[in-house]
Image (spheres, rainbow, N blue to C red):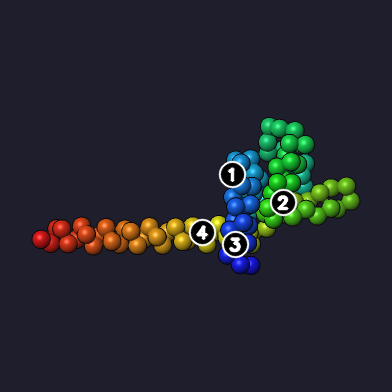
């Protein structure tokens, strides 16, 4: 995946996770493992249809997968796409670390004089 594709993918992932309900769905799935849609919906004060729409948004972003067992739909988290978010935050952290190191140098130089 080239840089532009990665940036587009990161944007899709961040858009999908910008909604608090979707973040909570992801948290539940990561902590408790794959779940049926009806069980996931029990965590929220909204209709099954509304929860399904949130799940579909997460599916489009590649953050969850759906497996059908008879009439039940089992939703599982996909952790690989989150690697892009982690890489981006890592870049931000390293930029801040450089700034903080530079600030520490300035402060040290000022107090030494």
Secondary structure, mark 4, is helix
| Residue in the image at 61% along x and 47% along y | 15
* Residue that label 3 marks: 4
Kindly indicate the quadrant of the structure image that contains residue 1.
bottom right
Q: Residues within 10 Å of mark 3 (few under 14, many from 20)?
A: few
Cα distance between the residues tagged 2 and 1: 14 Å
| Residue in the image at 15% along x and 58% along y | 110
**Between tags 3 and 4, which lies in front?**
3
Q: Quadrant of the C terminus?
A: bottom left
Cα distance between the residues tagged 2 and 3: 19 Å
Secondary structure, mark 1, is loop
Q: Are discs 2 and 1 less than 8 Å apart at CB?
A: no
* Residue that label 4 marks: 88
* Residue that label 2 marks: 60
Cα distance between the residues tagged 4 and 1: 16 Å
Secondary structure, mark 3, is helix
Image check: 68 left or right of 54? right
Eyeballing the image, is 87 above or below 45?
below
Pointer 2 or 3: first along the chain = 3
* Residue that label 1 marks: 18
Q: Residues within 10 Å of mark 4 (few under 14, many from 20)?
A: few
Place of residue 74 in the rendered image (x, y in percent of width and height, measured from the top left) = 78, 51
Extreme-bottom residue of the structure:
1
Eyeballing the image, is 44 above or below 62?
above
Pointer 4 or 2: first along the chain = 2
Q: Residues within 10 Å of mark 2 (few under 14, many from 20)?
A: few
Q: Are discs 4 and 1 less than 8 Å apart at CB?
A: no
Extreme-front residue of the structure:
4
Image check: 85 left or right of 94? right
Kindly indicate the quadrant of the structure image that contains residue 22.
top right
């Amino acid at each position: 995946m080239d840089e532009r594709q990665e940036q587009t993918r990161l944007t899709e992932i961040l858009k999908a996770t910008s909604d608090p309900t979707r973040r909570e769905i992801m948290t539940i799935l990561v902590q408790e493992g794959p779940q049926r849609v009806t069980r996931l919906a029990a965590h929220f004060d909204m209709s099954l249809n509304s929860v399904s729409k949130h799940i579909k948004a997460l599916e489009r972003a590649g953050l969850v997968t759906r497996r059908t067992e008879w009439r039940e739909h089992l939703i599982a988290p996909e952790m690989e796409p989150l690697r892009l978010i982690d890489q981006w935050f890592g870049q931000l952290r390293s930029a801040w670390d450089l700034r903080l190191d530079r600030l520490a140098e300035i402060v040290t130089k000022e107090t030494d004089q």
